[in-house]
Image: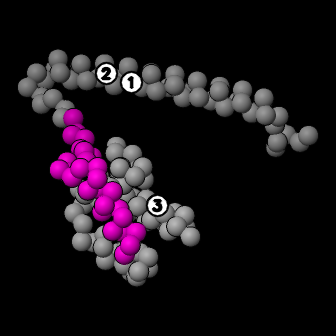
């Protein structure tokens, strides 16, 4: 076998050594950075502390719809798609509030609440609608 292509065990060993080296470098850098920050604070006590960036909240807005109402909304999307195709789905989905779209997607299992955005929710709902239509025949 040529030198270009290593055995899988040799490649894994090489990668593991590379990862270990990067971890050591990162720890050394972090320690150096901490020492520099402590020296900076000691030399300049009035120096403002670094501000931590606030994480963007991806909380799903609450909706007051029940499970039955969410399922009825999904059924109306199925009917609109059956009657008018994708244009019907788009029209019906555009009439629904964003928080309700997210809730419908979560209810039918088309996405996880922590990672769900409105476009992802609509794609997931559209897939479920197509599945539902295929199962009706």
Asked whether 60 falls inside the magenta stretch, the response is yes
Residue 10, percent from left and from top: 78, 29
* Residue at the spot 36% in from the left edge and 64% down from the top edge: 75
In the rendered view, does 53 fall on the left or right side of 82? left
Tag on residue 128? 3
Q: Which residue is mark 1?
A: 30
Report helix, strand or loop for mark 2: helix
* Residue found 78% across the figure and 34% down from its top: 8
Mark 1, secondary structure of its residue: helix
Residue 94: quadrant of the picture? bottom left
Q: Position of residue 121 (x, y in %)?
A: 37, 58
State which tag comes first along the sequence, 2 or 3. Answer: 2
Give x and y (percent) for residue 28: 44, 21
* Quadrant assignment for the C terminus: bottom right
* The disc label shown at residue 117, or none: none
Classify 10 Å Cα crowding around label 2: few (below 14), some (14-19), many (20 and above).
Answer: few
- Judging from the image, what secondary structure is the residue with disc 3 in? helix
Most distant residue in the front direction = 137
Marker disc for residue 34: 2
Magenta-tinted stretch: 52-80
């Amino acid at each position: 076998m040529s030198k270009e292509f290593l055995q899988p065990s040799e490649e894994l060993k090489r990668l593991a050594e590379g990862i270990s080296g990067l971890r050591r470098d990162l720890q050394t850098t972090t320690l150096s950075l901490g020492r520099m920050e402590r020296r900076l604070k000691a030399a300049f006590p009035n120096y403002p502390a670094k501000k931590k960036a606030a994480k963007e909240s991806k909380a799903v807005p609450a909706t007051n719809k029940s499970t039955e109402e969410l399922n009825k909304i999904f059924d109306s999307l199925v009917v609109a798609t059956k009657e008018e195709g994708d244009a019907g789905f788009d029209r019906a989905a555009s009439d629904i509030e964003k928080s309700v779209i997210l809730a419908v997607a979560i209810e039918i299992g088309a996405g996880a609440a922590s990672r769900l955005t409105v476009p992802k929710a609509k794609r997931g709902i559209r897939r479920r609608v197509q599945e539902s239509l295929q199962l009706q025949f």
